[in-house]
Image (cartoon, coloured by chain):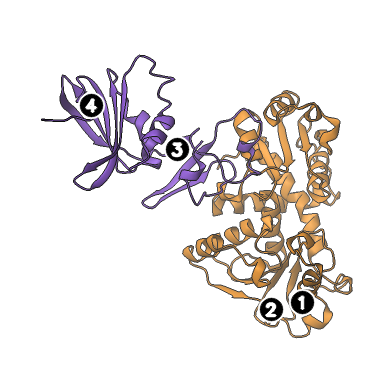
Chain colours: A orange, B purple
Amino acid sequence: MNFKGRDVISIKDFSREEILHILDVAQKMIPIAEGKEKSDLLHGYIMASLFFEPSTRTRLSFETAMKRLGGNVIGFARPGTTSMKKGETLADTIRTAESYCDVIVMRHPQEGSARMAADFATVPIINGGDGAGHHPTQCLLDLFTIKREKGKIEGNKVALVGDLKYGRTVHSLAYALALFGVDMKFISPPELQMPKEVVEECMEMGVSINIEDSLNNLKDVDVLYVTRIQKERFPDPEEYKKVAGSYKIDRNLLKNANKNITIMHPLPRVDEISPDLDSTPNAAYFRQTFNGVPVRMALLSLVLGVVK
Amino acid sequence: MKELRVQPIKDGTVIDHIPPGNALKVLHILGMGLTLPDSVISIAINVRGKRGKKDIVKIENRELDPREVDKIALIAPNATINIIRNYEVVEKRRVEVPDEIVGIVKCSNPNCISNGKEPVETKFIVKSRNPLKIKCYYCEREPEDISSQII
């Protein structure tokens, strides 16, 4: 398996075996990510962090990952401070940045931007989110979290909840879970259901899918993956309030759920998960956030060819 | 008296079995006129054939590379390409949808990077030929009505 020089644009670019290898490398990175061990694995390497759109977790965890491994980071968090403001194309920005670094991590508001950047760059491009397109490193850290919380990925029943229509993370996650043979429930208001193509693709991969519109039946669910329902999807604010309220996860709801249920969320959350759950062992979302660091350490080391 | 609406050509290429009303689109896709300033091009629209109406395009003194013509399969999937030498058909083949469609179809996603000011041509990967399904190489959106997205 050789990752050196590879781009990370979509989770679909990776086989099940390759994903497992990335997660194995991530597992070994945990003590370094926790700061318990020091490393200079990526000493002398430079990562360009090009964020054309706001981000908290993705950008900070990539930069942390690089620095914990002894590497350096250049870049920007707001395009307003770059020549893009003067009308420079993304293609030119990428060709400029690549002459200063060994790997580029980027987030851009337009779909397909990372794929295009990869065609122009000779250094590896890692997609940190391209509009409503892909977010493969989120998907990998979600899989890593399920593996760490449950001991394995396969054999769990996972419920994806919330905005399944527009949420970019859930489409790739559903595909990746199907790759591991995981049965799923898609729970959403009817207007925000999982797109038909995603459901069909998962079923063609041989997993069972239940489509539901309420959180009443969580007895057989091992992992509850919650996503944010966005206000702007609803023309009527009253309708939004009603829908968002009926998908709120709190202690009361968990009374009738599997007592070992693991609750995940890509964050940021608004009020879909009540803070009274934060202190329960079921709440895995902050551990999930941490897991972004070892997973991104693994990816950086692999695409730079420092780890095989 | 025998009447010929469009005369046979001595040498060149005849594109036959184009769906009625699409001959001009075919020429547009092939970029004719710009690339063939010295060829006489005849167009017949709504010609009655054995299987109903069709359009025909005749290009004189130029044998088109079949792969060049495959681009028209998007709007004329049953078209045939006939290479003519000295009034005889020396080669005849049906168009085939190519594996990749570059610079012909616009992505239907307004937020796709290929619809911005970037120095790239639009590019689609053919997912299935029958029915024809294509996917944007960049944003992976599949246009529902391909013919309305032709540039």
**Whole-number angstrom distance, CA of label 1 to CA of label 4:** 67 Å
**Residue B17 vs residue A37, the one in the foreground:** B17
| Badge 1: chain ID | A
Q: Is residue A5 visible?
A: no
The residue at the far top in this view is B38
Kind of residue at disc 4: Ile
Badge 4 element: strand
CB under 8 Å between discs 1 and 2: yes
**Whole-number angstrom distance, CA of label 2 to CA of label 4:** 64 Å
Badge 1 element: helix
Residue A24: percent from left, percent from top: 66, 52
Give the residue number, with chain letter if any, for mark 2: A214
Give neighbour class at mark 4: few <14, some 14-19, many 20+ (Cα, 10 Å). Answer: many
CB under 8 Å between discs 1 and 4: no
Give the residue number, with chain letter if any, for mark 3: B100
Q: Is residue B65 left or right of residue B1?
A: right
Question: Which numbered disc, 4 or 3, marks the residue that appears first in the sequence?
Answer: 4
Q: Where's the N terminus of chain B, which quadrant?
A: top left
Q: Which mark is residue A246?
A: 1
